[in-house]
Amino acid sequence: MEHTHTAAGHESAHTDSSTKSIWRTFWILLCITLVEVGLAFLHLEYGFLPRVLLNAIFIGLTLVKAFYIVAEFMHLGHEIKNLIMTVLVPLLLFVWFIIAFLYEGDSWKNMRKDLRPGTPVEVQKVAPAEKHH
Amino acid sequence: MDTAVTAKKKWWAGGYSPFNVSYGKLMMWYFLMSDAFTFGALLIAYGTIRFSSTSWPDPNEVFKSFPGMGHAELPLMFVSLMTFILIMSSVTMVLAVHAGHMRDRKAVAKWLMWTIVGGIAFLSCQAWEWTHLFHEGAWWGRNPFHNVDGTAASTNFTNFFFTITGFHGLHVTSGVVLNIVILANVLKGTYDQRGHYEMVEKVGLYWHFVDLVWVFVFTCFYLL
């Protein structure tokens, strides 16, 4: 709201368009959710789309929903740029967190698979010699 | 937003409002940012453990019940309803904030009331879901569900599910309490005396954040 310092009457002039954008955001959020649920059902019933692609779509759509909630409902999209940056830039840490931790988790899974007692024979033979470094 | 900004803004020299928002709103943003890290840490921990597991229960097998539908398998239906309720209550909250800008006391009270109804409806849904899962034998430290590959699952699945949805439910609960408090103030006319309805906006920010977190919980637990 860059024009808040103007008279209060100025705001009421925008009544109609403002409520309209609220409902527009609502329909966007609802439609995205329905698309997500629909895709999940198509996958369940017909195996539509491979799982990896489906998950990527889900995450993408989730971020779109998050954008609309933060930008429109929480009004951040209408605040001044400095405020937007102050709030959003620290959240970029999540990018590194997610990559680092999930990579770590995946590495643990591989170790569990490889080192499970008695599973692959060649690991039992080769691993003790190689695991020293 | 009735913070009349003076013509000469001293942006970074201890001036009135460098970000053109009130102190309270700015601090609410910072609080929400820190809360985002809390939820983020929980969800990333969940993701890490899930990635480190060789197999994991299928959410469509676990969350397939609907109240009053007996043993019909309806995956995703109930949680979609919960999501819809929360989005809807977010909308009524924005409408309350909007009515606050118009200084329309009755409209603010009406929309806040609907927001509270939505919040309570969501919590009731969650209470039903938790009770249902509990009767199926799921709880912290107990997991009756099998992994996708048929092996017995560890309790990680239920531990994370109850901890994260519980923490979110706690946020919804405090959101409902805050909404009730400001509704009482609206009805008393406190904000009319104060000259602005900014408190509705601040609580609104918190309420939308709860909705935002649910969007991620929904994806992480029910879709992926």
Image: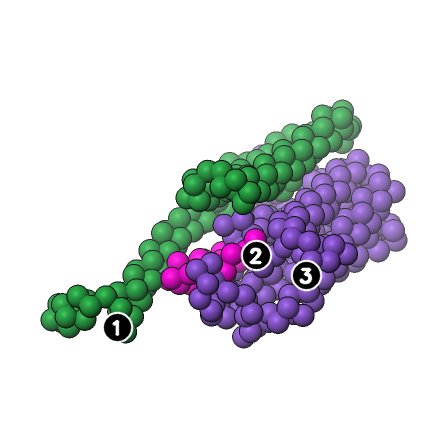
Location of the C terminus of chain A (image quadrant): bottom left
Residue type highlighted by circle 1: Gly
Which residue position is annotated with label 3?
Answer: B129
Residue drawn at (40%, 53%), measured in percent from left and top?
A98
Pinpoint residue A14: horizontal percent, then vertical percent.
Answer: 73, 26
Secondary element type, mark 3? helix
Q: Residues within 10 Å of mark 3 (few under 14, many from 20)?
A: some
**Is residue B92 at all visible to an observer of this figure?**
yes
Pinpoint residue A107: horizontal percent, then vertical percent.
Answer: 30, 60
Which residue position is annotated with label 1?
Answer: A118
Instruction: Tell me the chain of label 1.
Output: A
Residue type highlighted by circle 2: Glu
Per the rendered image, the range of residues in magenta is B39-60
Q: Residue furthest left?
A: A129
> In the rendered picture, chain B carries what hue?
purple
Nearer to me, A42 or B183: A42
Q: Is residue B121 above or below residue B88?
A: below
Q: Nearer the viewer, mark 1 or mark 3?
A: 1
Q: How far apart, in angstroms, are the residues tagged by discs 1 and 3?
A: 41 Å
**Dots 1 and 3: beta carbons under 8 Å?**
no
Which residue position is annotated with label 2?
Answer: B61
Circles 1 and 3 on the same chain: no
Magenta region includes residue B43: yes
Q: Where residue A39 is drawn, which disc sits there?
A: none
* Left or right, B40 with reference to A37: left
Residue type highlighted by circle 3: Glu
Chain identifier for the green-coloured part of the image: A
* Left or right, B223 with reference to B92: left
Of pointers 3 and 2, the one earlier in the residue sequence: 2
